[in-house]
Image: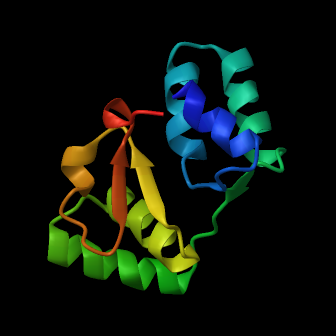
Amino acid sequence: MVAVFQAITSGQLRGQTLTLTEGLVGPLRKGDRETAQRYRDLLLNSFDFQVLPIDAAVAERAADMRVRYNMRTPDAVQAASAIHSGCDAFLTNNGSHFRRITELQILVLDELEL
């Protein structure tokens, strides 16, 4: 995972995310406000990442993907946002939820060799 973030910060990859919510859940559950703030700073105040908006077009695509791929809403919204923004690949820790998507190249973190 460190190699991925290094590639993003060096400009080799462009980072886009919707995962502020997911990134904050773990630290907030543990009461670790310091780590939660580091996530916020990284994702919201960094030139290396762009936090993608969720608009009507993304919502429509997410609904379609939810039906076609039998996905949970959060997963469908993330995938739809990636497609809508023109991402070349989608990086995830959970390939089983995303492998069926044909519109995106799915990269599973544990399977990457960088």
- Which colour style is shown? rainbow
Q: Give the quarter of the image for residue 76.
A: bottom left
| Image side of residue 106 versus residue 48, left or right | left
Q: Residue furthest front?
A: 114
| Image side of residue 30 versus residue 32, left or right | left
Point 66% across, 56% down: residue: 14
Q: Position of residue 82 (x, y in %)?
A: 49, 67
Measured along the vertical axis of the image, is residue 64 above or below residue 2? below
Q: Position of residue 21 (x, y in %)?
A: 55, 44
Measured along the vertical axis of the image, is residue 97 above or below residue 3? below
Q: Give the quarter of the image for residue 43.
A: top right
| Image side of residue 6 versus residue 59, left or right | right
| Image side of residue 16 versus residue 97, left or right | right
Point 49% across, 67% down: residue: 88
Q: Position of residue 92 (x, y in %)?
A: 39, 44
Depth check: give the residue in front, 9 or 96: 9
